[in-house]
Amino acid sequence: MSTESTLPEEAIILVVDDDARLRPRLARALRDRGFATLEADGPAAARALISERATHCVLDLRMPGGSGLELLAELRAALPQLQVVV
């Protein structure tokens, strides 16, 4: 499997996960592969960051404050070009 980025250089991956141990590890793994990252600990924080920047997203399914699937539906409606991994 290639680790080369197929995203544009300016692409930023937003990692959304309520697990305070897993989220930074995933973000660091992505940065180690050349991706810029942002982190959010739940849907509310993700909404604030998404509104500031167009990003690609990695979502957790179960989080306090809403599910990843609910957030996915919102993000898809607002930003149809957004690429998301759940």
Image: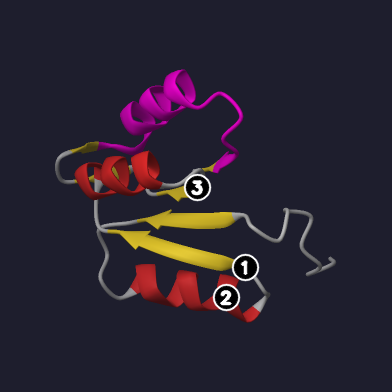
Majority SS type along the magenta span: helix
Which residue is most to the top?
77
Q: Amino acid at mark 1?
A: Phe
Gap in angstroms between the C-alphas marked 1 and 2: 5 Å
Question: What range is drawn magenta here?
Answer: 67-84
Which residue is most to the right?
2
Q: Sequence-wise, which precedes: disc 1 or disc 3?
A: 1
Q: Is residue 73 left or right of residue 4?
A: left
User: Residue 57 got which mark?
Assistant: 3
Q: Is residue 21 left or right of residue 86?
A: left
Residue in view at x 58 percent, y 70 percent: 30
Of 9 and 15, nearer the camera is 9
Q: Amino acid at mark 3?
A: Cys
Gap in angstroms between the C-alphas marked 1 and 3: 12 Å
Gap in angstroms between the C-alphas marked 3 and 2: 14 Å
Mark 1: which secondary structure? loop
The answer to if 75 sits in the magenta stretch is yes
Q: Is residue 17 left or right of residue 44?
A: right
Residue in view at x 56 percent, y 67 percent: 36
